[in-house]
Image (tube, rainbow, N blue to C red):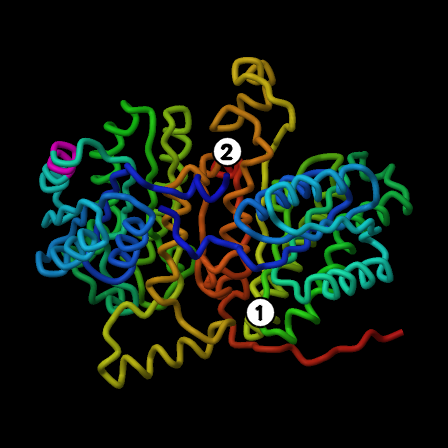
């Protein structure tokens, strides 16, 4: 028996990213719960393949090649999504550009690039979709962040600053749009791997031994959280970051 | 399929404080997702009522009168739950007293009042986790959901036992999560903000709720039903990689720091 509140049938979700990280998996999870999907990322086989998988599940899907750090492309993508599907109920921002270098060696260009993909894109996509959501007085925005959004790591200052920025964007916007009936939350992940490796094999890695659940995250591990926050199941959760990280942050 | 992971059919849940408020709502939600439910609390009337509602939904239910601050009663309750329903998959530590009703100047709090406040809100969760935890660890599977409060994370004027005990519940969650991480037991915490869990028939209560709602970013207080699906998620396979985590459900109150600032005035950039 499954509570009907978790169903996303009849809803349209945009999953925006840079083609790396969690975007494709989250799109599949939302489709499993019944949503139609627009997947926006720089072109390539990845997003079209995900769209095909979603269609095979009996849902509508559109892959729109988009440079998510570019205002005009984001605006066009959102307009196209609305003209094809009539509305947008859910926006998932899941860009991820990893970067590590000693702070003194970070160039202006590197800093800008890390900020543009990881933080500016969230601003652009949320602004473009939010206008439409505020008019309809309903919507869910879900930002995807790593553990480095809340804890620090040497050589990762630019990345941490950008991801921490996404969390503060989440909190502040959750206040501004609360009475517009739009919820803004974040979901967090720990270390994860797309490869299927046995837990025994994984434990050779000291990093994995540090994870309380003693395995890396799997692509499906964020599925429950994204459906929880995208659906009508949790209207009263707002401005939060919820982690599925195998217990790593319980140490902190 | 992710929705199938949210199915609780064949699971048995123990919910303390299950006769009223959030506990009753979570009992309904878990039963709605297919779980059998043991409703444990002191007063017989409300737990019998919740249990019969759960049976009305086609699930098995037991009402066991229990004072969670009494470890012997807790042990007996858990033994009976296991002997009658075969196992316990899910424990929700929800019993508690207080919030705003127990505020008092510190010099007026007696030793006994302090003890009762800590025992009911924190020690009870320890007793229940200890009693059910061994069974879960032996089976290599289980879900514990502790109900804390916004007052477990922030201070409250004249609010001592409740704040301290609820903060204790947050760290009980994190330490249990780390302790049982390799035993298949996940432990997480729900932090509710203001919820309307008392009857609104008295005008002063209505007024209090209305003024609280005005200060909430969403403009409303929580309804008990808001918590149900979250409890189902944390009780289910869908949260398999989630442990030691805090789930605030407060309309955005904590994210904004519960300040009555509303919209900031516009401040343009100056060249």
Magenta-highlighted residues? B78-83
Tell me the chain of label 1. Answer: A
CA distance separating discs 1 and 2: 32 Å
Q: How far across and how far down the image is residue B171, in percent?
A: 38, 43
Query: In this figure, which residue is indicated by the disc labeled 2?
Result: A246
Q: How far across and how far down the image is residue B13, in percent?
A: 25, 42
In the rendered view, tell whether residue B189 sits above or below residue A49.
Answer: below
Query: In this figure, which residue is indicated by the disc labeled 1?
Result: A138
Left or right: residue A245 versus residue B95 is right
In the rendered view, tell whether residue B211 sits above or below residue A207.
Answer: below
Where is residue A81, by image quadrant?
bottom right
From this viewpoint, is residue B129 visible?
yes
Left or right: residue B194 versus residue A138 is left
Q: How far across and how far down the image is residue B204, in percent?
A: 27, 84
The residue at 21%/39% (across/down) is B127
In the rendered view, tell whether residue A81 sits above or below residue B218.
Answer: above
Q: Secondary structure at mark 1?
A: loop
């Amino acid at each position: 028996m499954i509570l009907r509140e978790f169903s996303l049938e009849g809803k349209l979700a945009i999953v925006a990213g840079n083609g790396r990280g969690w975007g494709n998996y989250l799109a599949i999870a939302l489709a499993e719960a019944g949503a139609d999907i627009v997947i926006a990322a720089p072109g390539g086989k990845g997003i079209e393949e995900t769209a095909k998988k979603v269609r095979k599940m009996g849902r509508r899907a559109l892959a729109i090649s988009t440079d998510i750090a570019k205002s005009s492309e984001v605006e066009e993508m959102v307009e196209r999504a609305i003209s094809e599907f009539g509305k947008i109920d859910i926006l998932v921002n899941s860009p991820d550009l990893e970067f590590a270098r000693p702070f003194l060696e970070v160039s202006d260009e590197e800093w800008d690039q890390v900020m543009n993909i990881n933080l500016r894109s969230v601003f652009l996509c949320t602004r473009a979709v939010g206008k439409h959501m505020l008019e309809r007085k309903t919507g869910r925005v879900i930002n995807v962040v790593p553990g480095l959004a809340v804890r620090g790591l040497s050589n990762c200052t630019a990345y941490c600053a950008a991801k921490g920025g996404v969390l503060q964007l989440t909190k502040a916007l959750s206040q501004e749009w609360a009475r517009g009936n739009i919820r803004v939350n974040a979901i967090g992940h720990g270390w994860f791997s797309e490869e299927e490796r046995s837990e025994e094999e994984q434990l050779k890695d000291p990093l994995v031994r540090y994870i309380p659940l003693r395995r890396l995250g799997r692509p499906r591990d964020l599925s429950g959280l994204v459906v929880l926050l995208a659906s009508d199941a949790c209207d009263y959760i707002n401005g939060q970051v919820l982690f599925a990280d195998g217990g790593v942050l319980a140490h902190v | 399929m992710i929705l199938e992971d949210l199915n609780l059919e064949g699971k048995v849940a123990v919910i303390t404080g299950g006769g009223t408020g959030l506990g009753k709502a979570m009992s309904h939600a878990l039963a709605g997702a297919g779980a059998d439910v043991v409703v444990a609390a002191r007063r017989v009337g409300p737990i019998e009522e919740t249990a019969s509602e759960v049976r009305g939904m086609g699930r098995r239910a037991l009402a066991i009168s229990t004072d969670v601050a009494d470890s012997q009663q807790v042990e007996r309750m858990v033994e009976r739950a296991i002997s009658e329903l075969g196992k316990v998959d899910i424990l929700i530590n929800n019993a508690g007293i207080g919030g705003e009703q127990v505020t008092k100047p510190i010099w007026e709090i007696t030793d006994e009042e302090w003890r009762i406040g800590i025992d009911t809100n924190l020690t009870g969760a320890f007793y229940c986790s200890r009693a059910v935890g061994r069974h879960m660890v032996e089976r290599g599977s289980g879900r514990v959901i502790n109900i804390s409060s916004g007052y477990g994370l922030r201070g409250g004027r004249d609010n001592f036992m409740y704040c301290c005990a609820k903060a204790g519940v947050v760290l009980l969650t994190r330490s249990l999560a780390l302790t049982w991480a390799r035993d298949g037991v996940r432990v997480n915490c729900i932090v509710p903000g203001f919820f309307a869990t008392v009857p609104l028939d008295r005008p002063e209560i209505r007024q209090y709720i209305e003024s609280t709602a005005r200060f909430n970013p969403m403009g409303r207080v929580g309804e008990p039903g808001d918590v149900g699906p979250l409890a189902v998620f944390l009780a289910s396979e869908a949260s398999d990689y989630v442990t030691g985590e805090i789930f605030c459900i407060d309309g955005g109150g904590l994210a904004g720091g519960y300040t009555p600032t509303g919209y900031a005035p516009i401040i343009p950039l100056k060249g």
